[in-house]
Image (cartoon, helix red, strand yellow):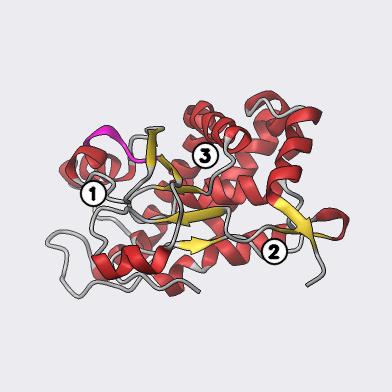
Amino acid sequence: MIELPHAPNFRDIGGYAASGGLRVRRGRLFRSDHLAALTDDEFAALTLDAPRVCDLRGVAERAAAPCALRNATVHSLPIEPTIVQKLNELIAAGGRLSPADVVALMQETYRGFVHGSTHRFAQLFGHLLDAEEPVVFHCTAGKDRTGFAAALVLRSLGVSAGDVMRDYLLTNERLQPRAEAHRVLAPEVVSILRRVQPEFLDAAFDAVDRGYGGLEGYFREGLALGDAQRKRLRELYLESGRG
């Protein structure tokens, strides 16, 4: 396991069992939080040779904390954050946010990934299909935009829904809660915002089912992954399950 104190949610998503007795290849696919604050020691620990980085952060997020990963080629696939704006609108309207309200907002955010940002995830798969080098994809915390992206990548390779959810929930172990108090939001609300829940990812896949008739339809129609593209993904990112 790679430990990066300044990017604690960085991790290799290889090793999961896939369809056909194969396994996701290690050292090729990495998910992460932002990579703007890595130290020299952390760079040395990564040992990634000229990776391709797909940055899912919004324009302002990327400008405020540019990727500092050395020898990387960075591609911006911006998905603008919406949850903060929605929270601010509710607070400005005088509403008192309950934990249930925040869960509902997070579910709406995840449905929005499907309704409004499918083209960005299609671009991510375009990079995966084109890359011979390691690929790192990330957002700011590496939990929501990156979480859905990782789920799509793993499912496209034939990883089980259970393993995909387990990978998604690992974020809660990797991200340490910050000690400072939020000036406006109640602690129980902040706790939800800083973690992931199965209900969030389930909301995205529910939107996939409703809009595309299921995951296979989403791969074909939303992400432009036909038989040839799926075969290429398997060739690039799967290996024998033995060993």
Using the image as rendered, state which of residue 12 and residue 101 is in the foreground: 12
Q: Secondary structure at mark 2?
A: loop
* Distance between the alpha carbons at the discs numbered 1 and 2: 43 Å
* Res. 15 image quadrant: bottom right
Q: How many C-alpha atoms fall within 10 Å of the one at disc 3: few (<14), some, or many (≥20)?
A: many
Task: Tell whether 178 sits left or right of 98.
Answer: left
- Amino acid tagged 1: Gly
Mark nearer the N terminus (3 vs 1): 1
The answer to whether residue 17 is above or below residue 75 is: below
- Amino acid tagged 2: Tyr
Residue marked by disc 2: 16
Residue marked by disc 3: 111
Circles 1 and 2: CB atoms closer than 8 Å: no
Query: Residue visible at 52% across and 39% down?
Result: 111
The answer to whether residue 58 is magenta is yes
Q: Secondary structure at mark 1?
A: loop
Q: Secondary structure at mark 3?
A: helix
Query: Residue visible at 60% across and 51% down?
Result: 151
Q: Which mark is residue 95?
A: 1
Point out the frontmost of discs 2 and 3. 2
* Distance between the alpha carbons at the discs numbered 3 and 1: 23 Å
Q: Which residues are magenta?
A: 56-60
Q: How many C-alpha atoms fall within 10 Å of the one at disc 1: few (<14), some, or many (≥20)?
A: few
- Amino acid tagged 3: Arg
Mark nearer the N terminus (1 vs 2): 2
Q: Position of residue 209 (x, y in %)?
A: 69, 37
The answer to whether residue 241 is magenta is no
> Could you tell me what secondary structure mostly forms the magenta stretch?
loop
Using the image as rendered, state which of residue 38 and residue 199 is in the foreground: 38
